Amino acid sequence: MKTLLSYLGNLKEYIIFSALVLVSLILIFQNDNVQIRFVRVIAVNVIGTLQSGFSIIPNVFELERENKTLRETNINLSKELSMLKEAKLENLRINQMLDFKTRTNYRVASGKIIGKTLIQTRNNITIDIGENDSVKVGMPVITDKGLVGKIVATSGNYSIAQILLNKDLKVSAKDQRSRVDGIISWDGEGKVRMKNVSKSADVQMGDIIMTSEYSNSFPAGIPIGFVTTDGTLDNLFKNIEVECFVNFENLEEVFVLKYLSDDERKDLEKKFNEKTK
Amino acid sequence: MMLEYLKYGAIMLALIIVQKTLIWLIAVTSYEITPDLVIIGLVYFAVKKGKITGSIGGFASGLIVDIFSFSFIGLMALSKAVSGFAAGFFNNQQKIERYLNTYQFILIVTFCSLINNIIYFTMYFQGTNLVFADVLLRYIVPTTVYTALFSTIPVIFARRRRFTR
């Protein structure tokens, strides 16, 4: 300690001088004139140059921390990107649906599919709208592309619809070009078929099939699909395969058409059928 | 001891007052070059008393000059502290008389004045269009030479005093 004090004692001239220089510099930098501003600019440049020079030397700890931060940022940005992509696709779908909504003559309720089965012979979808949205059993379910199916059960906030890929659903349909009638149904595998079409009927590949006026459940003119196979089933009927316009694999949003079949027509047809039996 | 320092302080104060009030009467060249009387006094006391007296005296006298000139506070204090400290290096008990009473004093004043002027004028003309060569030729060298000329006065007085004895 004594040695240190004596060493400092020997340096006292320099210590005092340094202190005075420091005080002078502090006083100088308190000024706000052109010269000091210029000196500040020089100082900033010198420090910046030195810092950029030293930045070449890698700091392992700093790099590790930077790496961690970058990884976190990367994950966050990926999440954000994924969300934005999802939002963009949703936006496109909703825009298409809104466009359809303005085109259709019927009142519609839009819903999101919250459940779906596609591997059974009786496939259904569950929609997040129900009786509270005036959805009733029997109402057609469609998209801007075409027919999806029909509501078969409802609750307050949910409903279940049979889709075209369901053995129990049968739809009266017709060829848009030749006006040939038939019944659309699914056999539990492959594509849907248009049945009850006579061998001599004018049906060609590529013809558009849509719902017909004979249907009790669906309004006429809803597109269903197009003919992909036009073959012969037996001596009387054709084997017509139809590719649905709606892709059930990636279906996410649907419309429920606020359309119910005419009860008067139903009753009349029922009474007539009973009489003829 | 205390009285001696008070005497030095009074002389320095007098020199500062003359420097700030009457010196313009002997200004030369279009750049109004004047001798620096304060540095002559400062070098005299620093050679006599050492580095600490030189630096503290330089700082204090420089600060007073700064305050009187109302601009750039601290610049003259810095340049005078450095030159006072430099003058303190000539504080040698065996050579004090020679340093103070011969032409060597003029050389020491020239050296210290040069340090003082380089620091002061270089900083003072920062941010202007003048390059260092201009500042050197227009201000630093003329002021140093003019101050050196004035430093002959105490040497002449000292020699006369010696001859009288």
Image (cartoon, grey):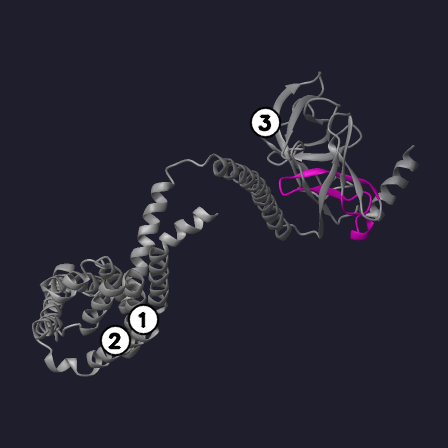
Question: Which quadrant of the figure contains the C terminus of chain A?
Answer: top right
Label 2 sits on residue: B12
Would you say A249 lies left or right of B64 here?
right
Label 2 and label 1: CA atoms lie apart by 10 Å
Please give the chain letter of the residue carrying mark 2. B
- Residue B131 against residue A83 in the figure, above or below: below
Q: Is residue A46 above or below residue A27?
A: above
Find residue A264 and report its horizontal and vertical position in percent.
85, 48
Q: Report the Cα–Cα distance between label 3 and label 2.
A: 119 Å
Nearer to us in this view, A18 or A251 = A18
Q: Nearer the viewer, residue B115 or A251?
A: B115
Q: Judge if badges 1 and 3 mark residues of a common chain.
A: no
Q: Amino acid at mark 1?
A: Ala
| Residue located at (67% from left, 25% from top) | A191
**Residue at (62, 50) in percent of width and height:** A98
- Judged from this view, the residue extending furthest toward the front is B165
> Percent position (x, y) of residue A263?
84, 47
Residue type at the position of mark 3: Gln
* Residue position for label 1: B60
Query: Horizontal and vertical percent for residue A101?
Result: 64, 50
- Dot 1: element: helix
Q: Which residue is mark 3?
A: A204
User: Magenta segment range?
Assistant: A128-154
Q: Nearer the viewer, mark 2 or mark 1?
A: 2
Chain letter for mark 3: A
Find numbered disc 2 in the image and state the secondary structure of the residue it sits on: helix
Chain letter behind tag 1 = B
| Disc on the earlier residue, 2 or 1 | 2
